[in-house]
């Protein structure tokens, strides 16, 4: 199983600190100290996951992520972005590019490790429980885990791994409200914090994809006070 993680950060101290902690957790770490080298190593080494800083000279993290996503062999590689920018607009930009998760500096190494493991599990690098890979259908809606897709009345929407996991969680609780805290804990693998906006961004993208294949029908309801409910 691929246990290589690429760390791209121009701050040598942070890069080394992440490397030491990841290696102590059993991962093989590849380092890059600028965006250009980071993209090159991503394509050359094909890591299981990329930890990518935003603020770097010449080629920033957003640009590097775009280049990584454009390459067929790294298009689906999970990217955890490190940033001192906590504004929602920066998160939207990253998610639109294809970043999987954000971690705002300064952060605890334990939190980094939790998010790394959650991303690797979601991408299939860590075995998931059996039974989550089968096709499941409720009325006109079918989920297809292996393809990260949802079929509605014969039309298919391709989702990102995070979008699929959110939909699958709501699907498993069809008709029941799921709190934002529960989504954070079950999908991202860590306790609730001030990152509720992250969920809102992903749900907005998810809704848009579903409505395109469902003739505008709205399956996901927002629950007052924080949370969502799928109604099929």
Image: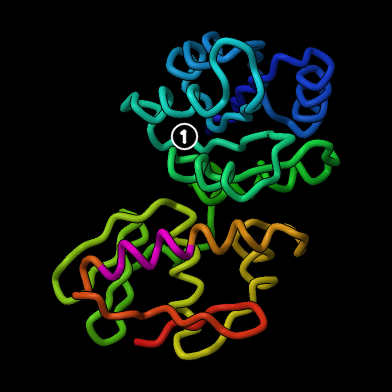
Q: Quadrant of residue 138?
A: bottom left
Q: Main secondary structure of the magenta part?
A: helix
Q: Residue sitting at 48 percent across and 76 percent down? A: 170
Mark 1 secondary-structure assignment: loop
Closer to the camera, 150 or 206? Answer: 206
Q: Is residue 149 magenta?
A: no
Residue 201 screen position, x and y as percent: 52, 58
Q: Which residue is mark 1?
A: 77
Is 156 on the left-hand or right-hand side of 195? left
Q: Is residue 206 magenta?
A: yes
Q: Residue sitting at 39 percent across and 30 percent down? A: 69
Closer to the camera, 222 or 178? Answer: 222
In the image, is residue 52 above or below residue 142?
Answer: above
Q: Which residues are magenta?
A: 203-211
Closer to the camera, 45 or 215? Answer: 215
Residue 213 screen position, x and y as percent: 21, 68
């Amino acid at each position: 199983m691929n246990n290589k993680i690429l760390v791209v950060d121009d701050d040598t101290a942070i890069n080394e600190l992440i490397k030491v902690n990841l290696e102590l957790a059993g991962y093989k770490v590849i380092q890059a100290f600028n965006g250009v080298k980071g993209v090159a190593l991503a394509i050359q080494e094909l890591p299981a996951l990329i930890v990518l800083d935003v603020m770097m000279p010449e080629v920033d993290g957003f640009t590097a992520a775009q280049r990584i996503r454009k390459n067929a062999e790294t298009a689906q590689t999970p990217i955890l972005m490190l940033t001192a920018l906590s504004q929602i607009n920066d998160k939207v930009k990253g998610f639109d590019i294809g970043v999987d998760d954000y971690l705002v500096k300064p952060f605890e190494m334990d939190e980094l490790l939790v998010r790394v493991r959650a991303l690797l599990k979601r991408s299939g690098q860590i075995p998931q429980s059996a039974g989550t890979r089968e096709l499941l259908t409720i009325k006109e809606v079918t989920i297809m885990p292996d393809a990260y897709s949802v079929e509605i009345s014969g039309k298919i929407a391709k989702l990102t791994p995070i979008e699929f996991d959110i939909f699958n969680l709501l699907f498993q609780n069809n008709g029941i409200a799921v709190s934002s805290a529960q989504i954070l804990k079950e999908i991202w693998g860590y306790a609730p914090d001030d990152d509720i906006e992250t969920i809102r961004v992903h749900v907005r993208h998810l809704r848009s994809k579903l409505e395109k294949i469902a003739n505008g029908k709205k399956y996901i309801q927002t629950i007052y006070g924080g949370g969502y409910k799928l109604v099929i």
